Image (cartoon, rainbow, N blue to C red):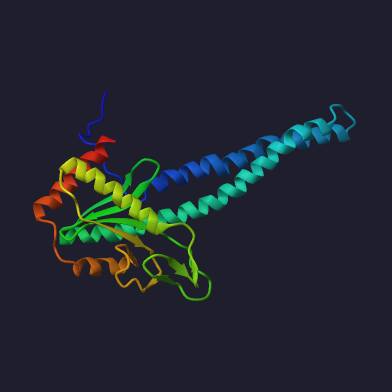
Amino acid sequence: MKSPLKFKPLSNPGESLHQKLIDTVFDGVLLGYLMIAIFTPVLVYAWGVWLAQVIPNPLIVTAVIAPVMIFGVYRMISGSKKLKSVRLGLQGEKAVGQFLEKLRASGAIVFHDIVGDKFNLDHVVITKSAIYVIETKTMSKPAKGKTELSYDGATISWGGKPIMGDPIGQVCAASTWLREILEESTGKRPIIKPVVLFPGWYIRNTNSGKSNVWVLNPKAFPTYIKNEEERIPSEDVHMFASHLCRWIRSQ
């Protein structure tokens, strides 16, 4: 028996994070709960037997089980924290992906969650102006205060301090990787534009042409594309999309 599908389906927005969410639930949170659920009754039983003046001595059982239970609690707590972060990232990628789907009406070709070697491209949008490699960063908002990020062409800051991670370096590396893939496949050098999107945040941009990377709120992205001149012929748009689609399905 074999699948009736001729081609492997392309990825949905946030598919890698969805798998990571599942892995975090089973490997982190549920593993901790399972350890506690299994060993707590054994520990209670051992102490109950000892209090009833029946051997075995529960100190031995405690010495064996306590480290496992402590490890289980640690995994449960750390897994819960990671779960919150992954869930937030997943929601952000899905929201941005669904927003980008609207660009298809203007002729754009949109891909989601392209998996490379130990990394993934959240979204790729191919238009007549450029091929946009998009990194989505979903940051929690503060309970009070401004939800404003500053971008000076080199650093993304919040409240005067650089944010954690290196989204600029990340999206530039992803863009270089995609350029090499498409250039090798098509024989043409594609025009690649790195973009970092922060859903729900206002971006104060003081870049002034220092960097090729756009840092935007997703709602501003269509306007930026619209203001770009067309540099890729229609046939090349479909050629790049076809080669990228073929590469994805071959992996």
Q: Is residue 229 above or below residue 62?
A: below
Residue ID at (27%, 53%): 124
Q: In the image as oriented, which residue stretches furthest toward the bottom?
A: 145
Q: Is residue 59 visible?
A: yes
Residue 237 position (above or below residue 150): above
Residue name at image x 90 percent, y 31 percent: 53
Q: Residue farthest to the front?
A: 210
Q: Position of residue 38 (x, y in %)?
A: 66, 35
Asked if residue 54 lies left or right of residue 101, the reply is: right
In this view, the residue in front, 128 or 44, is: 128
In this view of the protein, can residue 94 be seen by the observer? Answer: no
Q: Quadrant of residue 29?
A: top right
Of 244 and 212, which appears nearest the observer?
212
Q: Residue furthest top?
A: 1
**Taking 61 as reference, is 108 left or right?**
left
In which quadrant will I find the N terminus?
top left
Q: Position of residue 45 (x, y in %)?
A: 78, 34
Q: Position of residue 77 (x, y in %)?
A: 61, 49
- Residue 44's image quarter? top right
Look at the picture and state if 13 lies above or below 218.
above
Front in this rendered view, residue 2 or 74: 74
The residue at 72%/37% (across/down) is 67
Q: Looking at the image, which residue is at 19% across and 52% down?
A: 190
For the C terminus, the image quarter is: top left
The number of numbered badges drawn on the structure is 0
